Image: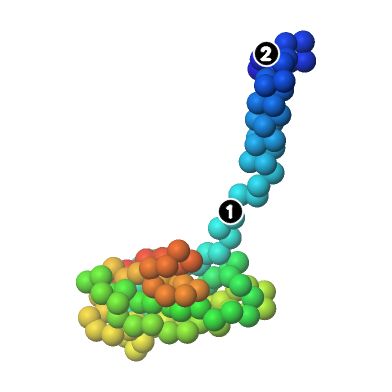
């Protein structure tokens, strides 16, 4: 930026260059939003009698989450509260034949939220019941 070099400056140029440097410094100093919360389901595919394991990490310690089950037809099929441990993790198991409403076979989506379904603070993970 030759325009901002000390040898070629007047008062307005110094003001513009200073403002540009302050703005750049502010932008670079801002921490990026880190999306550290996550969860997984294992296995990805299983029968109605398989135990699916849900595990999460990076959630607010000691908080209560909402777990929403979206069925194969895309409709909300149930929800439950999920407590988060002091280390920010949670774990739970689900056996479709006894814990999910019929019809059970197909592509499901589990949605974990700090507030309500569809909010910005939700994470989704899909799995298939055969």
Q: Secondary structure at mark 2?
A: helix
Label 2 or label 1, whichever comes before in sequence order: 2
Rounded to the nearest whole Å, what is the CA distance between mark 2 and mark 1? 34 Å
Quadrant of the image containing the N terminus: top right
**Measuring 64% from the left and 75% from the top, which residue is drawn there?**
61
**Measuring 45% from the left and 67% from the top, which residue is drawn there?**
122
**Label 1: few (<14), some (14–19) or many (≥20) C-alpha neighbours in 10 Å:** few
Quadrant of the image containing the C terminus: bottom left
Q: Residue placed farthest to the top in the image?
A: 7
Q: Which residue is mark 1?
A: 33
**Measuring 77% from the left and 15% from the top, which residue is drawn there?**
6
* Spot occupied by residue 96 in the image (x, y as percentages of width and height): 34, 82
Left or right placement of residue 35 versus residue 18 in this view: left
Q: Residue placed farthest to the front in the image?
A: 11
For the residues carrying marks 2 and 1, which lies nearer the camera in this image?
Answer: 2
- Is residue 43 visible to us here? no
Q: Nearer the viewer, residue 129 or 102?
A: 102
Specify the label residue 2 is tagged with.
2
């Amino acid at each position: 930026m030759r325009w901002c070099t000390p040898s070629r400056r007047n008062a307005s140029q110094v003001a513009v260059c200073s403002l540009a440097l302050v703005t750049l410094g502010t932008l670079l100093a801002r921490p990026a939003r880190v999306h550290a919360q996550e969860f997984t389901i294992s296995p990805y595919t299983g029968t109605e009698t398989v135990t699916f394991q849900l595990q999460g990490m990076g959630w607010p310690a000691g908080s209560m989450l909402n777990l929403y089950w979206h069925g194969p037809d895309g409709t909300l099929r149930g929800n439950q509260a999920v407590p988060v441990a002091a280390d920010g993790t949670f774990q739970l198991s689900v056996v479709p034949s006894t814990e999910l409403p019929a019809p059970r076979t197909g592509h499901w989506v589990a949605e974990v939220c700090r507030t309500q379904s569809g909010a910005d603070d939700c994470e989704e993970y899909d799995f298939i019941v055969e």
